[in-house]
Image (spheres, rainbow, N blue to C red):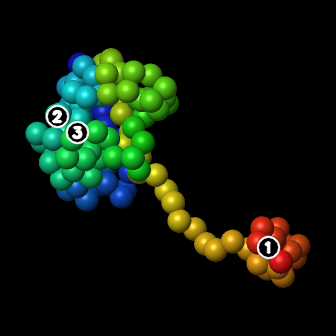
Amino acid sequence: MTITIHLPSVLRGCCNGTSEVRLSAETVRNALEQIEKHHPELYQSVCDETGAVRRHINVFVNNDHMRERDGLNTALADGDVLTLLPAVSGGSRLPEKGDRHLADSEPAPFFGGG
């Protein structure tokens, strides 16, 4: 059975810039084992030294997070799409009194003390 692994731009450098990898796998765990064999740099970005998916990586099978299914033991079917999606974090500081939204002239909500 062939599945497609979709790679967002931040992970494409691990696979010569490709946006998709196709491989044969019966479970998410098996797909990660195949990635380890054929794309070790990608595997190291997705999994830690114990083989667990890194905390900041989300793994989706079609539209479902693997945690909502059977985790690494989630069965895959021919044509499934596995998406490896790093979490996005960061941003800016908390708004301060008097800050304005960029979109309008209303003051931004203030979350600080004082």
Q: Is residue 42 visible?
A: no
Secondary structure beneath dot 1 equals loop
Separation (CA) of disc 3 from disc 1: 44 Å
Foreground pick, 57 / 50: 50
Neighbor class of circle 2 (other Cα within 10 Å; few <14, some 14-19, many 20+) is some
Residue 109 relative to residue 14: left or right:
right
Which residue is label 2 attached to? 34
Task: Name the image quarter holding residue 20.
Answer: top left
What residue is disc 1 on?
Answer: 113
Residue 102 % position (x, y)? 76, 75
**Which residue: 36% across, 33% down?**
82
Residue 51 numbered tag:
3
Q: In this view of the protein, which residue sits in the foreground, 35 or 4?
A: 35
Q: Nearer the viewer, residue 35 or 79?
A: 35
Secondary structure beneath label 3: loop
Q: Amino acid at mark 2?
A: Gln
Find residue 71 and report its image quarter: top left
> Upstream in the sequence, badge 1 or badge 2?
2
Q: Which mark is residue 60?
A: none
Please say if 78 is above or below 50.
above
